[in-house]
Image (cartoon, rainbow, N blue to C red):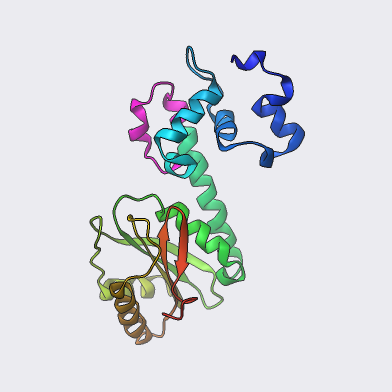
Amino acid sequence: MNMKLMPADSRPREKLLQRGPGALTDAELLALLLRTGIQGKNVVALAQELLAQFNGIAGLLHTPAEALKTIKGLGPAKRAELVAVLELARRALAQQMQEKPCFDGPQAVRDYLQLQLGARSHEVFAVLFLDSQHRLLAFEELFRGTLTQTSVYPREVVLRALHHHAAAVVLAHNHPSGSTQPSSADEALTRTLKTTLALVDVRVLDHFVVTAHGATSMAELGLV
């Protein structure tokens, strides 16, 4: 149905203004960003098609702008807006962690790591560098690997911690397989980094295993 022919309270923009964003489906929220559909397909139908093709809103927003060029109806402006939305979310969460101790709001850490790493198709090992109050100093992706393995060099982690004058770190890596269960290799790596960083008086507070659907804290499992 043409959007103009829909009842006013069923159109995404009017529905949001009257009932709040929580009343909208993912497709309706995405339609607000896209604004227009294409010939023969209204904007909500286009949004639904994109969500189906890219495995939901997270998959779509994590898709590089270059990869969206092949999609009919997504011009440069729309591609840029989708990328900008994800970057704004990352920066908002980073700001929260810079202004107050990370573990005053552990869900913010999980959300931030999922936005950064959750949809990657290859393994990435990253570190949150924290000050003595456990506020975020920097986030760095230090190592990238294949689908199943990343080589992590403790010396490089130590050097980056010293560079940022970090008092503590939170380790994180993703599992492209979708499993949030830490492996025996993850446990061994955590022990190695904890011992190595302790030599320069830097604490390992946690190690998160991240997927598109969640992030498991190894500290909560007693593995840190």
Instruction: From the viewer's side, name the closer residue of 188 and 95.
Output: 188
- Looking at this view, is 222 or 142 the one in front? 222
Is 77 a magenta residue? Answer: yes
- Quadrant of the snapshot with the N terminus: top right
Image quadrant occupied by the C terminus: bottom left
Q: Position of residue 170 (x, y in %)?
A: 44, 71
Please say whether residue 80 is one of the residues in the magenta stretch.
no
**Number of numbered discs overlaid on the protein picture:** 0
Q: Which residues are magenta?
A: 61-79
In the figure, residue 69 lies in which quadrant? top left
**Residue 158 point in image, percent of width and height:** 32, 76
Residue furthest right in the image: 18
Q: Which corner quadrant of the image does residue 133 belong to?
A: bottom right
Q: Quadrant of residue 191?
A: bottom left
Q: Is residue 76 left or right of residue 8?
A: left
- The answer to whether residue 222 is above or below residue 106 is below
Residue at 51% in and 66% down: 136
Left or right, 87 with respect to 161, comes to right
Residue depicted at 42% across the width and 44% down the height: 62
- Residue 50: x and y, percent? 44, 31
Residue 123 percent location from the top left of the image: 30, 58
Up-down relation of residue 71 to residue 114 (above or below): above
Q: Residue at x 40, y 55 (%)?
A: 117
Q: Residue at 47% of width from left, 58% of height from top?
A: 214
Q: Is residue 134 left or right of residue 14?
A: left
Q: Is residue 4 above or below residue 184?
A: above
